[in-house]
Image (tube, grey):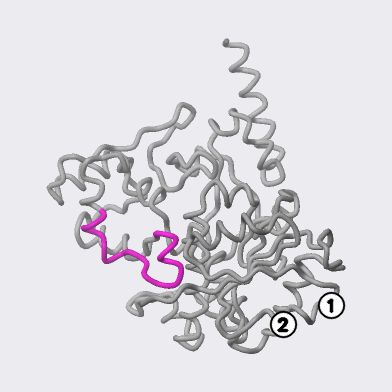
Amino acid sequence: MIMAYKILYIDDLETKSREKDIENLGYEVKLYNPTSDISDLFKELDAKTKACVLDYRLTKGENNACFDAPTIAQTLRTKHKNDLKDFPLILMSNEGIKVKEFDKDLTSQDLFDFVLTKQEFSNDKSNFKKKLDSFVKSYEIIIQHKFDLNKIIAFDENFTLHSRIKSDALTINKNLFSLSSFIYYDVVRPIGILIGEDVLSARLGVSKESEDWNKLLEIINSSIYAGAFSDYLKRWWMDKINKWWSETISSEVSLRRLNADERVELLKSKLGLKNLTPLTKTKHSLSSNFWTICKDSREPLDPFDGIELIKDYLPWQEKEYLSIESALAGKMDEYKNQISEIDKKAVRELVKKERANG
């Protein structure tokens, strides 16, 4: 029988209903309303505690706590910095601004494994459970494999892993939280050595709505990622996809050089899958040599047709793009700090042109 994970839920207000919600997901929940003495926290923890969910603001309760979630998180991270007793910390707050401040895309705060608003939790409890379980398991996998990165990410040593991934992982120096976060946020989630289903669809040129899409996925099943977080994020090794294409579909022409129609015709003829539908260009795209997706809409995109999002990419990560359609739909404001002035000007000119043409 699989034992339920034990979760410490730290909140000072509106606790009972949220506690019940978490219990209903199959967890053993211990509710803690913090006191003014942070050392009292350690009395609430035991060897069975697998994760801690914290509200951000903790100073309004009857126990007169004088600190908020980051202080507790920092205390726990420091306590377990060099041992194997650390566990995931999740910030779940009504304060959307605070949640954004701690979002891994926007800050380098080394405190929480992931963050969400209470509204996001209420909207999709099953996703919360799937994600939390995956983070808990990632810590267990790291311990099981004694920080051996190749084993943790189930890397096939017949291929070559980017040297910076290995060296960056080594600098983490036996810290569970840091290695888990590095694997999730820097290796598994971004487009790079691994790709998600939307990018896979774009690179194969095949619509996921195709009748034979799942048959195609079965054929390339050996390329699927099976390491830490694979139970939450479905990913494929791009190197394996390229090798499969070269060995099975065409050794003469690479995927990148073909448009969607050409890719699909080759797939049909080589695999006998008649019901594969090619992806089509969006209104403002010139090319169907798809290789990525729009960050916002998830529509397939040739990078040459997209607006590059400027950020600090690691050497093995590929750049992200916003489609012209998403920019015109008002999404440019959301990404304004990641868009060059030249691209902003070009989109403004296009908006004027479209308005003039009715």
Picture quarter with the N terminus: bottom left
Q: Amino acid at mark 1?
A: Asp
Residue 232 sits inside the magenta stretch: yes
Residue at point 83%, 68% (across, down): 63
Q: In the image, residue 3 lies at what x, y percent?
A: 43, 76
Residues under numbered marks 1 and 2 in contact, where contact means CB atoms less than 8 Å apart:
no
Q: Earlier in the sequence, mark 1 or mark 2?
A: 1
Q: Which of 64/107 is in front?
A: 64
Q: Amino acid at mark 2?
A: Phe
The main secondary structure of the magenta stretch is loop
Q: Circle 1 sits in a helix, a strand or a loop, which is it?
A: loop
Say whether residue 291 is left or right of residue 41.
left
Q: Which mark is residue 295?
A: none
Q: Residues within 10 Å of mark 1 (few under 14, many from 20)?
A: few
Residue at point 83%, 59% (across, down): 60
Q: Examine the image and state in which quarter residue 79 appears.
A: bottom right
Q: In the image, residue 185 lies at what x, y percent?
A: 56, 64
- Tell me: residue 48, above or below residue 305: below
Q: Examine the image and state in which quarter residue 356 appears.
A: top right
Question: Pointer 2: what residue?
Answer: 42
* Residue segment shown in magenta: 217-234
Residue at point 16%, 46% (across, down): 273
Question: Pointer 1: what residue?
Answer: 37
Residue at point 47%, 73% (across, down): 4
Picture quarter with the C terminus: top right
Q: Which of 8/238 is in front?
A: 8
Q: Examine the image and state in which quarter residue 245 appears.
A: bottom left
Residue 41 sits inside the magenta stretch: no
Say whether residue 8 is left or right of residue 43.
left
